[in-house]
Image (tube, grey):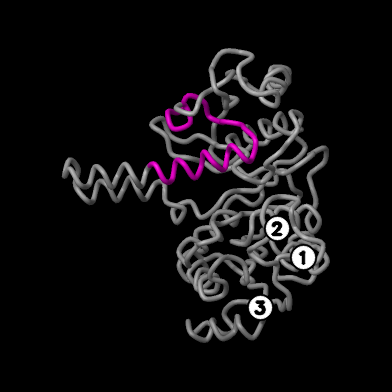
């Protein structure tokens, strides 16, 4: 029997009310074994609501890392001190010990990244982990990396993100020889700020197919299989894509130019509920970070993803 996915039951804006429901759905509808980590009393009350007491394992953790902790490396001293005994910290330990195959959390991204680095550990030679998410494009899908784990990286870190993103495209999306584009303000070599210019000097020497610079309009055009950038810019791009899709579909709906069914299908492809979350790459274990506002259906999908490709998504030894 495969090891279960450890779910940080206390993480996210809605806590156990949604994470427990998502875990139940993942187990019953997708056959994914799950263990819920957090305050056992609260978790069991939610399990009882779903008639699932005894159906899903529970590991008690008394403390909770607050959602107010923002940004990688921004976890406060107090939160860092309790992280080992928090639901997030205990879940990380389960992954590190091999008693869980992966971690899913809708908690603060900064807290998840910090706790995962301490509790699970970076893969060999990796400077910082990065969040990867596959965005639907007109040509299939493009991996955006970093989507928010490291907001102020060095050029060397950005170069490693490119390697991690290329590995993700190969192992998870099945792209045999993924192309990598560096997000900048112009496609010409040398365009961009100091970080991007320096990263652009490093990327051609790496064992990947470097396309060169790409611009914002290339992200959804499928110009490259991977778009690499820093976590600050990547998160802005991701949120802009989600917001732009919603706004555009709303405008189209008002004109009556497309059927509601067609619009819903497009919206579904970009909805966080569809992909569940972003993969945190560069660790010795598998971690998926779900949106903080995730409801049960999103948590269920987030549980399903790492269970399917946990053995591939470690992506280590590539940098």
Q: Which residue is mark 1?
A: 79
Q: Is residue 120 above or below residue 67?
A: above
**Distance from Cα at disc 2 to Cα at disc 1:** 9 Å
Element type where label 1 sits in the image? helix
Q: Is residue 61 above or below residue 6?
A: below
Task: Write down the region rendered in magenta.
Answer: 218-244
According to the image, label 2 marks what residue? Answer: 111
* Residue 17, numbered label: none
Q: Nearer the viewer, residue 84 or 247?
A: 247
Q: Position of residue 162 (x, y in %)?
A: 66, 31
In the image, residue 59 lies at what x, y percent? 70, 76
Q: Is residue 177 visible?
A: no
Q: Which quarter of the figure is the N terminus placed in?
A: bottom right
Q: Are marks 2 and 1 in contact (CB under 8 Å)?
A: yes
Instruction: From the image, tell me which residue sits under label 3.
Output: 58
Between disc 1 and disc 3, the foreground one is 1
State whether residue 216 is above or below residue 119.
Answer: above
Residue 267 location (% of width, % of height): 35, 48
Identity of the residue drawn at 66% across and 49% down: 311
């Amino acid at each position: 029997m495969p090891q279960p996915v450890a779910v940080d039951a206390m993480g996210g804006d809605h806590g156990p009310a949604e994470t427990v429901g998502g875990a139940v759905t993942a187990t019953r509808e997708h056959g994914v074994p799950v263990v819920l980590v957090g305050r056992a009393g609260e978790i069991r009350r939610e399990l009882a609501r779903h008639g699932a007491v005894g159906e899903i394992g529970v590991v008690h953790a008394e403390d909770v890392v607050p959602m107010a902790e923002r940004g990688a490396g921004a976890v406060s001293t107090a939160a860092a001190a309790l992280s080992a005994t928090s639901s997030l910290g205990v879940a990380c330990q389960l992954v590190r010990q091999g008693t869980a195959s992966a971690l899913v959390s809708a908690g603060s991204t900064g807290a998840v990244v910090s706790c995962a680095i301490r509790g699970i550990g970076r893969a060999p030679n990796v400077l910082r982990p990065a969040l990867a998410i596959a965005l639907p494009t007109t040509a299939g899908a493009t991996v955006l990396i970093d989507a928010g784990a490291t907001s102020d990286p060095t050029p060397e870190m950005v170069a490693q993100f490119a390697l991690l993103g290329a590995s993700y495209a190969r192992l998870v999306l099945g792209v045999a020889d993924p192309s990598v584009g560096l997000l900048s303000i112009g496609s010409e070599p040398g365009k961009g700020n100091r970080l991007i210019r320096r990263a652009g000097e490093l990327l051609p020497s790496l064992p990947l197919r470097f396309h060169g610079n790409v611009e914002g309009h290339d992200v959804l055009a499928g110009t490259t299989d991977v778009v690499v950038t820093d976590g600050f810019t990547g998160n802005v791009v991701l949120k802009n894509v989600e917001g732009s899709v919603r706004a555009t579909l709303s405008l189209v709906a008002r004109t009556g130019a497309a059927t509601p069914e067609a619009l819903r299908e497009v919206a579904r492809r970009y909805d966080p509920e569809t992909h569940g979350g972003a993969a945190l790459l560069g660790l010795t274990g598998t971690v998926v970070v779900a949106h903080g506002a995730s409801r049960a259906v999103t948590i269920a999908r987030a549980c399903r993803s790492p269970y399917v490709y946990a053995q591939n998504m470690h992506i280590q030894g590539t940098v």
